[in-house]
Amino acid sequence: MNFFETRRFFLFGMRFFFGMWLLYVGLVKWVVFKPANFTGMIVGEFDKTWSPHALNVALAWVILIAEPVLASLILWGRKARLVWTLVSLLMFMLTIGQTIMMKPDVIANWQYTVLTLACAALSGPRGPGRKE
């Protein structure tokens, strides 16, 4: 397989760039903000909405754990379709969160959702009888 084949090239670039970015934002929450501060911020903001407190706490921890773990899995490159699918679900969760908060910048989250879903779709087998 040629590395410069369009599909492979795109997926490699997305693995590297999106993986590094997601790893960075995930680690910043652990190292700079600290888990207690991040969860406190998320819970404090979402407790002002209709979202239940227990769900807010759980989802804050999902974000904290999922971002660096999924970023590492993207960079590792195994089970690409599964990992990109999980990342697209994370991006959708973040999109719903921005929608609940009525944030106008929710469109950026939609772009990430579409991008990661496209990566999931392109990471699957190319056709009947082909394993990649």
Image: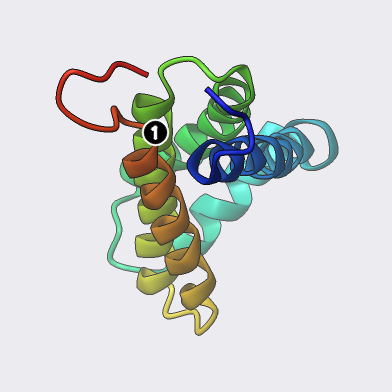
> x, y (%) of residue 131?
30, 16
Q: Quadrant of residue 13?
A: top right
> x, y (%) of residue 6?
54, 46
Q: Residue at x 57, y 46 (%)?
A: 10
Residue furthest to the bottom in view is 104
> x, y (%) of residue 22?
65, 41
Colouring scheme, one of rainbow, by chain, secondary structure, one colour = rainbow
Question: Nearest the camera: 59 or 117?
Answer: 117
In the image, residue 62 sits, relative to residue 130, either above or below, namely below
Residue furthest to the front in view is 2
Residue furthest to the left in view is 128
> x, y (%) of residue 113?
41, 57
Residue 43 can be seen in this image: yes
Amino acid type at image mark 1: Ser
Q: In the picture provided, is 46 more to the left or to the right than 54?
A: right
In the image, residue 69 sits, relative to residue 86, either above or below, namely above
Question: Nearest the camera: 14 or 93?
Answer: 14
Q: In the picture provided, is 67 more to the left or to the right than 126?
A: right
Q: Quadrant of residue 26?
A: top right
Q: In the picture provided, is 56 more to the left or to the right than 4?
A: left
Quadrant where the image shows the C terminus: top left
Question: Nearest the camera: 44 or 90?
Answer: 90
Q: In the picture provided, is 31 more to the left or to the right than 48?
A: right
Which residue position is annotated with label 1? 123
Neighbour class for label 1 at 10 Å: few (<14), some, many (≥20)? many
Q: Residue at x 62, y 53 (%)?
A: 41
Q: Residue at x 54, y 57 (%)?
A: 44
Q: How many marks?
A: 1
Question: Nearest the camera: 25 or 61?
Answer: 25
